[in-house]
Amino acid sequence: MAVITISRQTGSGGDEIAALVCKQMGYQYLDKAMLAKAASEETQSEVDFLKFTDEDLVKGSGLMNRLLAAMGGGSGAAVQMRTWAEDANGQRSMQVVQLDESRAIQLVQNAIRYVAAQGNVVIMGRGAQVILKDHPGALHVRIEAPWEDRVQRIKLRYDLRGEGARTEAQNLIARRDDARADYVRRFYDVNVKDAQLYHLLVNTGKLSIEAAARLIVAAAKLLPA
């Protein structure tokens, strides 16, 4: 029951590779809904705040404000988790628990560990390569690509055209890469580019998306049972 974590540069083809790996191995992909479900099961509470993607992250103290904004909350709002309490008469009532940044991150970490314990899952980003660094049967992968390849992929993905398309793509790549790197550095004190975090580094400037997926699948099958 292997677990595959994937860290990727924006525009490197990581999302497409993850989808192919899931298809070829019959694995689940840890998306927002699955993460929220795992957090709910792990805490025995109804978690409703985990619209949590790397793209929601920004550098420094603005991280949670950006995360909340992506969820429709205002700047400075608190992250919330709904819990249910039952009184002596068996009546259930909902309580809203306010979570600070530290508790919100802890909840994500616990949910990732919970999912990893079930196995057969691909986890993209969210610091999973650090959270599960000692997890048995985990394969940690970093996917990179040359700058120009990344720019072209982003232009195609978001249908960016016209005179400012290249600049827009470059800015998007820089913004997302910086946010992801800052997140891992801030909460785990590591450099996301550190090769020591990974079993496998894949350059999609040298390999096709399909070949990269096959390579990861082959590596996962070599992990100790």
Image (cartoon, helix red, strand yellow):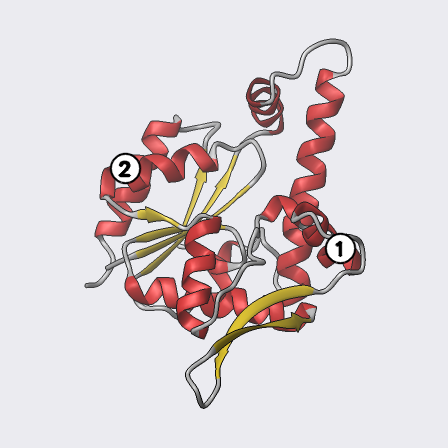
Q: From the viewer's perspective, is residue 139 above or below residue 113?
A: above
User: Where in the figure is residue 30, as x and y percent of width and height?
Assistant: 41, 51
Residue 218 position (above or below residue 183)? above
Foreground residue, 5 or 53? 53
Q: Is residue 202 above or below residue 121?
A: above
Give the quarter of the figure containing the C terminus.
bottom left
Residue displayed at 59% across by 48% down: 54
- Residue in the image at 23% along x and 44% along y: 26
Q: Which amino acid type is marked by label 1?
A: Asn
> Residue 159 placed where, x, y %?
61, 16
In the structure shown, which secondary structural element does the residue marked by tag 2 occupy? helix
212 with respect to 76 (left or right): left
What residue is shown at x 31% (from left), y 68% (from top)?
136
Q: Is residue 36 left or right of residue 57?
A: left
Residue 184 at x, y = what percent?
A: 62, 59
Q: Which residue is mark 2?
A: 23
Q: Position of residue 192 (x, y in %)?
A: 58, 54
Number of other residues with Cα within 10 Å of mark 1, as a class: few under 14, some 14 to 19, many 20 or more: many
Tell me which numbered mark, 2 or 1, is placed earlier along the sequence: 2
Which residue lies most toward the top here? Answer: 162
Q: Secondary structure at mark 1?
A: helix
What residue is disc 1 on? Answer: 65
Q: Is residue 140 left or right of residue 74?
A: left
